[in-house]
Image (cartoon, grey):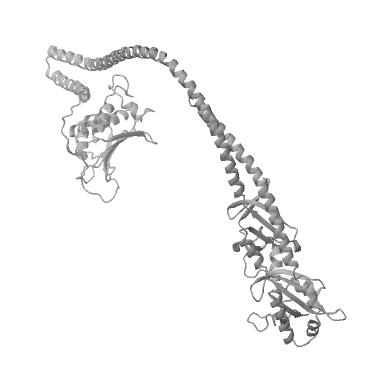
Amino acid sequence: MRWLPQISALFAVFAIATGIFWGSFGYFQSEEQSKAEGRLSLYRSSLIAELQRFSHLTHILARDPYVVEISAGGDTGFLNNRFKDFVAATGLDSIYLMNADGVTIAASNAGTPSSFVGQVYSFRPYFLSAMKGEQGHFYGIGATTGQPGYFLADAVKDEDGTILGVLAIKIVLSKVQERWRDAGEKILLTNRSGVVLLASEPDWRFRVLYPLTDKQKERIRLSRQFPGQDLEPLNWQQHLHPEPSRATIDGMSSLYLFSSDLPHDWSLHYFASDDRAVARSMLVTGFGIMIAAAILILFQLQRTRRIGAALKRSEEEEALLRQANERLAVEISERRTAEQALQKTQDELERASRLAALGRLAALVTHELGQPIAAMRNYVAAAEISGTSNLTSTLSTRIGGLVDRMEDITRQLKFFARTDEENFEDVDLRDAMQISLGLVEPNLKESGVLVHFSPPVEPILVRGSRFRLEQTMTNLLRNAIDACEEVDDPAMTIAMGRTRHTVWFEIIDNGHGLGGTSLKELQEPFVTTRESGRGMGLGLAISAGIVNDHDGQMSAWDRPEGGAVFRVELHALETAWPIKDDRAVGALQEYPSDEVGEDRDA
């Protein structure tokens, strides 16, 4: 907020400068507009004078006795020299005489390579107008010389008024556009079709202001007015809205004026620069800014005096502020002490939470192990009372089953006590899967699950803990067996293989699937989809931890036809067998009946 006055002052100066610039620019631009109108009027007058300079010459020469005589069939040698002298005296480009058929019979350039003699010009509009008894005029590129010019023509008549031929002169207006260019002007002359006839810039000549219509193009073609010219549009644009009118030509914006009060419906277009108006406006604006800056400096001096007085008053307030800072420092110290105490309390709460979780785990273990231990105790007591061998054999079988179940529970729990000193080794996933299948073989026979597994020919090697990888496979196999309990034809497919950088194995079952539960939820400890008393929900949590410890990843999804797929991907051993492409190896075939799934009714 303390910079607000300075910012406001700068905005005020900027607004004033902007107003001064545009106000002065409008004034100076109007002056440039007036000057441009004067120059345009001057150029218009000089152009009309140039066009009318020889307008009566054709009328006079057409009535010259020599011209009439030769048009009636006299010798043209004398007339050629006479025309040549006229051209030298007047500065014309050429004078020539045509008969009634448009064939040139005498010319000032006779005997030269570009002589008009013998050329037919009956197609030219000026010839056609003269044959009608009117003065013909035409601007175009010469059909013989290829040089542009302005043509005037009058009919040659005998004493009876019969038209014997046409006398024409050609005027070159190149000096007009040279004067425009030497004066540094941007100006161009167009005919009624918008074709540029003369221009201060050579590149503008024979361009069009607006696209030609088909009728205009046909008229130009028949008269051979601009042979060899493409008549491409001129790079310009007129801005109609602002006053005074402006236009952009060749990428430069200028004041734009035009005059259509010219002979033959021609128009003169003038582009005037307003750089002088801009420069003068900048000077005026700079002067205004200097005045505004002086006012701002005076304002700042007064403000400095007021600030000095305020500083003297603030010395007393500084002592009070120092005391307040000291009290604030004491409060900050007390707050830090309170934050440390709060952090200590939070740490104690976290430890208490972990102890509570541990107590919950202990309660679960006690609950799971209590029943099988009590049952063992009852079986042993019964055996001691009966003392029969047959009962002893049955008791041994039952106790063995209970011991297996207790071992199953404790095997899962011991993986929570992870050690960082375990040794990694090269492990072949084929051997690990065979061992895991052997561990769950009793479960497979009991549930009648048919296993399809054909190990790949090549080793599937990873670097890791053999025992923990076997445990992961065992957990996933048991989950698949449990998922197939209520299926009529329970089956399981095991596939494994490798790509260029990874190895993988999949366990596919046709059981009840994931039941709408995500893999992330199933990996949480104590989360299970089985009924109460049928598991602790630790298998997937343990397996996920083992896969993560091996820098791998585990994924799962439901199959459209029923069941689920669990896939584990691990990093391939660098020294493993090479492969030619990224196609996975391994096959899905029925597991040998002599190993697993043969005695489904046992």
- Residue 106 appears in the figure: yes
**Quadrant of residue 233 in the image?**
bottom right
Examine the rendered structure and indicate whether residue 268 appears above or below residue 485: below
**Quadrant of residue 65 in the image?**
bottom right
Residue 251 position in % (x across, y down):
58, 53
Left or right: residue 424 compared with residue 266: left
Quadrant showing the C terminus: top left
**Quadrant of residue 325 in the image?**
top left
Front residue of 354/438: it is 354
Left or right: residue 256 compared with residue 543: right
Residue 74 position in % (x across, y down):
78, 87
Examine the rendered structure and indicate whether residue 393 appears above or below residue 186: above
Residue 32 position in % (x across, y down):
66, 49
Going by the picture, which residue comes out furthest to the right? 160
Examine the rendered structure and indicate whether residue 517 appears above or below residue 594: above
Front residue of 394/372: it is 372
Front residue of 564/359: it is 359
Residue 546 position in % (x across, y down):
24, 31
Count of numbered badges drawn on the protein: 0
Going by the picture, which residue comes out furthest to the bottom? 75
Front residue of 600/425: it is 425
Examine the rendered structure and indicate whether residue 268 appears above or below residue 592: below
At 28% from the left and 28% from the top, the residue drawn is: 540
- Residue 232 appears in the figure: no
